[in-house]
Amino acid sequence: MKFGKCLGQTIKDVPSEWRPFAIQYKSLKRCIHKIVQELNDKGISRDILEALLDAAEAYKMEYSSEINPNHIRSYIKLDLDAYSSDIRSSHPLTEHSLESIQSDFMKFNLGSVSSLSSLPSTDSLDTESTISDPHYDLTAEAISVYNNPSTLHGMTYIELQTDGEFFDTLLEEMSQLNHLQQQNKDDYMDKVKKLDNNLIDVTSPYKKDMYTWREIFQLYLQAEIFIGTTEADRNEHDWENAQNQFKWFTDELSKTNLLHKFKLNSSRETFREFLGINNDLMIMKRFQYLNKTAMSKILKKHDKQTCLAASPNFEKLLERNSYFTGNLGKSLCHVLIKLLSTITPQLEDHTCPVCTFIYWKPIRLYCGHVFCVRCIIKANNKKMRNCPICRSEDAVYKADSSNLDKPLQNFIKLYFPREVNAKKEENGKQEIEELMGNSFSGTECRIS
């Protein structure tokens, strides 16, 4: 299926209020046909263009555009005096004599030359500085400067009006997309703030659904839907990858039957909000992907059909455009992940690095590292004086009851009651075995 038709069908899946902001691919294709027609009308046929723009020994013909915030001015520049008489008399690549090319240009552009008779000649005008002046504007028709209207020589500029209109249209569409992106970002942040308030309520340790929410968020973070969280992958994922990972997440929810464990109706409603926010971000990424693809393809089509290499110059402009080069999805995803990790503390963030269980009665050494009290006792019994992590001298040896982190202990007791009870039970078994003199059969100390 051709891209234009595929784009037309796909764009129906985005919100209707976004559709007018999409790159108008079909309209721009029609504009390209007008550019080709204008080139033909000016006597610049395709075979001449291909040879003059690409040949090392051809005319100095240059396609360029001068960009200001509101307008792109496109023109072809020919240096007709740069070559020896043998090259000028017959160009082997174009199979056109200089005279025939001159004749074609004069035939189609004589009216423009005549209308510019009041302009200074190349002898009295610095065309290089004039053409680069942002306040200077070429006439809309075509040719700027000739020494003699009967022959072509010197530096000549042929403005391409429809080509300028093509890129002016792209600039306007880029501006509209930036405006839409900012509006969508503001709407997204408003929804996240509302979700934040609702999650604080339903994930409260005083409510019945705290553990269910924690399991859901563990799956969500594991899915790495929008951005990688490993050392090997911290990049933003494209929308197709994100869509696949989101499907994996929802499939896992169905397999584990987690949603049926909710006790509160407010939890079910909040979860629907959570899915909606993820879906909004997915649609934004897909819409951005469609417009990036449309922009890339229309530039390639322009260059192929007109033989004018516009892409390199225009892509430099795109590099400064936040919609096409910005990582909005990554920044918005960071906001969501930070929200989840703040509201629902994860067990792996509160485990002893030695026994890998939750650090009940956490001992914070003077170096800042935290361990459960049982592992510190075992380290002392083994005459280990230094911190097991950073080897800070006498950090374990100097630890006493004042090193108990009471605020952290209260936090853990509040948010991880099941794990705390399991840890207490395990500690009790170890104490009994140690008192009875039996070999330790539970969790071994891993300090070495």
Image (spheres, rainbow, N blue to C red):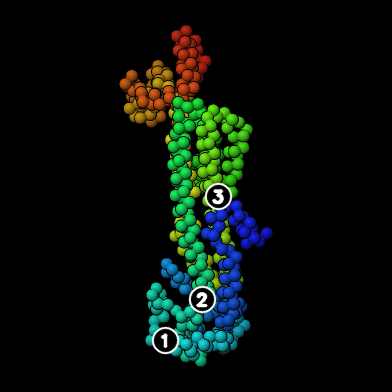
Q: Which mark is residue 119?
A: 1
Between label 2 and label 3, give the one nearer the viewer: 3
- Circle 2 residues within 10 Å: few <14, some 14–19, many ≥20: many
* Mark sitting on residue 267: none
Q: Say which label, 1 or 2, has the lower sequence index.
A: 1
Location of residue 190 (image quadrant):
top left
Residue pushed farthest right?
A: 1
User: In this picture, is 86 found above or below 37?
Assistant: below
Residue 283 visible in this rendered orientation of the protein: yes
Numbered disc 1: secondary structure: loop
Residue at position x 49%, y 49% in the image: 329
Label 3, residues with CA under 10 Å away: few <14, some 14-19, many ≥20: some
Q: Amino acid at mark 3?
A: Ile
What's the mark number on residue 161? 2
> What amino acid does circle 2 point to?
Gln
Q: Residue at x 40, y 26 (%)?
A: 411
Q: Position of residue 177 (x, y in %)?
A: 49, 58
Q: For the residues marked 1 and 2, what is the alpha-carbon distance in whole angstroms?
A: 19 Å
> Where is the N terminus found, in terms of image quarters?
bottom right
Describe residue 26's horizontal placement relative to residue 430 as left or right: right
Which element is circle 3 on? helix
Give the alpha-carbon distance from disc 2 to disc 3, as whole Å.
Answer: 37 Å
Residue 238 appears in the rendering: no
Q: Position of residue 255 (x, y in %)?
A: 62, 33
Q: Residue 162 appears at what percent x and percent y?
A: 53, 74
User: Disc 1 residue type?
Assistant: Leu
Q: Dot 1, crowdedness within 10 Å: few (<14), some or many (≥20)?
A: few
Q: Is residue 358 above or below residue 295?
A: above
Q: Quadrant of the C terminus?
A: top left
